[in-house]
Image (cartoon, rainbow, N blue to C red):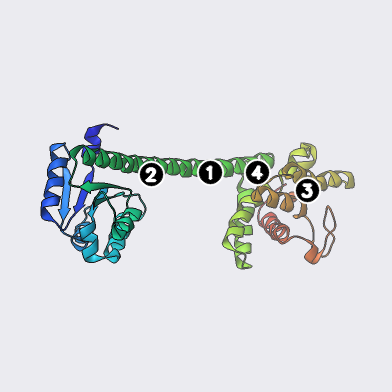
Amino acid sequence: MHFDEIARGQLLIIDSRETDARILWEILSQAGYTNIRTAAGLRAAIDMVQNGFQPDLVILDLEALNAEGLGPLRDLQRRISQDSYVPLLAVVTGPDFGLKERALLLLARDYITRPFDRTEVLFRVKNLLETRLLYLQVQHQNQVLEERVRQRTRELEAARLEILERLALAAEYRDDATGKHTRRVARISALVGRELGLPSGSVRLLERAAPLHDIGKIAVPDRILLKPGPLTPEEFEVVKAHTVIGARILSGSRFDILRLAEQIALSHHERWDGNGYPQGLSRDQIPVPGRIVAVADVFDALTHARP
Ligand SMILES: [Fe+2]
């Protein structure tokens, strides 16, 4: 990382001894650091942060900590490093550390000793600031990547739904090139589902799976599918097979929507009295989505002209 970038990092010196703060300020500003603030104590530092100053590195003198205690330090740390990493550099008097100094060192990332050694101060500050700025870079990159993943997921979801819609349209194309019937069945199914009190997620899934109910018609020849008059018993058997064929086309998926579509394809011609097909299920044996689509399908067939 270029030093110019590091030198723009925001430094906060908290020192109850004005002369020490002054010396640190001079060492750092002579070295090229441009954003240095000093606070006479922890509470003054908290005020600065509350007024919008976000430090990248906090240099804290033991005396300042002694005067105000751990509470304000924790408060300060909470405010400056909520979702990021802000290093703390302790200022202590060496070489023998007392209990309090050792306590401060536990909270700090590193330390400098009094009297100040210019080189030591500059090295410590540069290293900690660089770590902080790299951390921010990684955090920013992660956010960009997360947004990109979200965007791609949205696109994939839209593509998935569009492919399902087009698949449904392909199934209906020969007797309903506009796709209006499938869309109406989907809409009516969703309305019925909602009226029955199904959870909104299930209703949405139902609306998207319902258009595929007749996908098995792909396998029914035109001469039968488009025949205007009544069907012979043999022809009707072929038509009935569209339920089983549809379920087979949709079977084995690991996606909820396709598993639901499979269930609907298989069961949307069952009847409450047991006289439906292909399995002749009755009443509660018929899955609810199959029952709903059956009602929607018949309602639409009764209210619109179709072969
Ligand atoms: Fe059908």
Q: Earlier in the sequence, mark 4 or mark 2?
A: 2
Structural distance between the alpha carbons of marks 1 and 2: 29 Å
Task: Residue 62: give x, y in percent of width and height.
Answer: 24, 57
Which residue is identified by label 4? Answer: 168
Structural distance between the alpha carbons of marks 1 and 4: 15 Å
Beta carbon at label 3 within 8 Å of ligand 1: yes
Three-letter code for the amino acid on which mark 2 is drawn: Gln
- The answer to whether the residues at label 3 and label 4 have Cβ atoms under 8 Å apart is no
Three-letter code for the amino acid on which mark 4 is drawn: Ala
Q: Earlier in the sequence, mark 1 or mark 2?
A: 2
Which residue is identified by label 1? Answer: 158
Q: Secondary structure at mark 2?
A: helix
Q: Is residue 285 left or right of residue 147?
A: right
Residue closer to the observer: 45 or 124: 124
> Which residue lies at the image location 84% right of the left edge and 47% below the top edge?
236
Which residue is identified by label 3? Answer: 243
> Which residue lies at the image location 23% right of the left edge and 65% below the top edge?
68
- The answer to whether the residues at label 1 and label 2 have Cβ atoms under 8 Å apart is no
Task: Residue 59: give x, y in percent of width and height.
Answer: 23, 50
Beta carbon at label 1 within 8 Å of ligand 1: no
Three-letter code for the amino acid on which mark 3 is drawn: Thr
Instruction: Find residue 197 and report its image quarter.
Output: bottom right
- The answer to whether the residues at label 3 and label 1 have Cβ atoms under 8 Å apart is no
Q: Secondary structure at mark 4?
A: helix
